[in-house]
Image: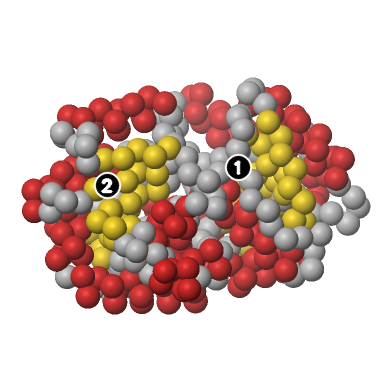
Amino acid sequence: MVLPSYYSGQAAGNRMMAYAKEYAKLGKKVYLVLGAGDNFDVPTIEGVDVKSVVDSSRNSLYKKVAEVVTELYTDDSAIHLYGTPVLLRYLSPMKRNIFLEYTEVPSYGRKQGLKSKLTEWYKMRLTRKALGLFVISKALYNYYTEEGFKNIGLVNMFVDESRFAPQINDAILRKKIITYCGTISMEKDGVDVLLKAFSEVLKKHPDYQLRIVGRGETERIYEQTVKISKDLGLEDKVLFTGLVPYTEMPKMLMESEILALARPDNEQAKYGFPTKLGEYLCTGNPVVVTRVGELPNYIEDRKSCIFAEAGNAGDFAEKLCWAIEHPEDAKQIGRQGREVALHAFSSEVQTKAALKMIENPPPPQSKKE
């Protein structure tokens, strides 16, 4: 398994850790090759041999990751690669045994123009070198089907539920904290909308705090987010924690009274699926989330979540206040949300589906360019 861009506690890392754990439980020899631009925390997983590669340059990092993978590779190996088709430039001798995973549409985060289109074309061409694709949503499945791909496996969002075991959950004291975790962004997760909503919540509930966990999508976006917080007069009420180690994230989420995700209704929401939602739901705490993409297919308003209107800070604030003011109802919603996570987003079930495709390799991909 290969994750070329790894940072502890982020969604991609958590997803690959869960994959690795389940592959090992199924009796497979698992190497997890992780690359990052600085030091990072890596948990110990029984049956998984972790190889860490650190380099400040992305190009040389990818080359080093590929070198490690090449050294580990044998004729009966399969490579599960997360979201970085560029690495296929360096893994061409093993291209028939690579399964590439996507959780976002290729155009996300790019300005439309000639350069962007050329980049997308090149990445799509590299993607066709893989033996198969794993995608996280039906929308992505349809997207790649329309592009001529045949060997596609749908592996939904999932979470390692053992990290949020009930005995741990019950022992944690909830605080008056609303928490968001993930890559801090406006286009992807609507953190600006969340901040504006929280400023309205404080007018009725001044004793609450908002905690934003993660790193900025870019340094500029992080700085813009901090500025919005200051402009709203929230300096003393919003805590930017930065990255949090994988092992500490469950407690941080479980001690929060409410978990929030104000994702906008855009292309990212249409094709992606927020992997953080599984962790949110597994805590058993109420989740306030915007009604976007495929989320309504799995969770239901006022039963397993509290839905808010996308892009509407006033409505999001209203739903946060409702959760605060109706604690017993909110707790029941949280408990039901956990049940949904355990059944619909089981890491064991989803990993078995991925392994079935890996062990029964399909014929070569379409050669459409």
Q: SS class of the residue under badge 2? A: strand
Question: Which of the pair 107/251 is nearer the observer?
Answer: 251
Report the amino acid beneath label 1: Asp
- Name the disc covering residue 32, or none: none
Left or right, residue 52 beside residue 144: right
- Image coords of residue 71 (percent x, y): 87, 40
**Quadrant assignment, res 17:** bottom right
Report the amino acid beneath label 2: Leu
| Residue where numbered disc 2 is placed | 210
Can I make out residue 129 in this image? Answer: no
Residue drawn where x is 61% and y is 72% of the image: 349
The disc, 1 or 2, on the residue closer to the chain's N-terminal end is 1
Residue drawn where x is 26% and y is 66% of the image: 306
Say which quadrant the C terminus sits in.
top right
| Residue where numbered disc 1 is placed | 41
Question: Which of the pair 115/60 is nearer the observer?
Answer: 60
- Image coords of residue 185 (percent x, y): 37, 38
Of all residues, the one furthest to the left in this rendering is 203
Question: Which of the pair 61/357 is nearer the observer?
Answer: 61
- Image coords of residue 97 (percent x, y): 80, 51
Residue 233 lies, with reference to residue 188, above or below; the image says: above
Q: SS class of the residue under badge 1? A: loop
Residue 353 lies, with reference to residue 113, above or below; the image says: below
Left or right, residue 369 beside residue 318: right
Can I make out residue 38 in this image? Answer: yes
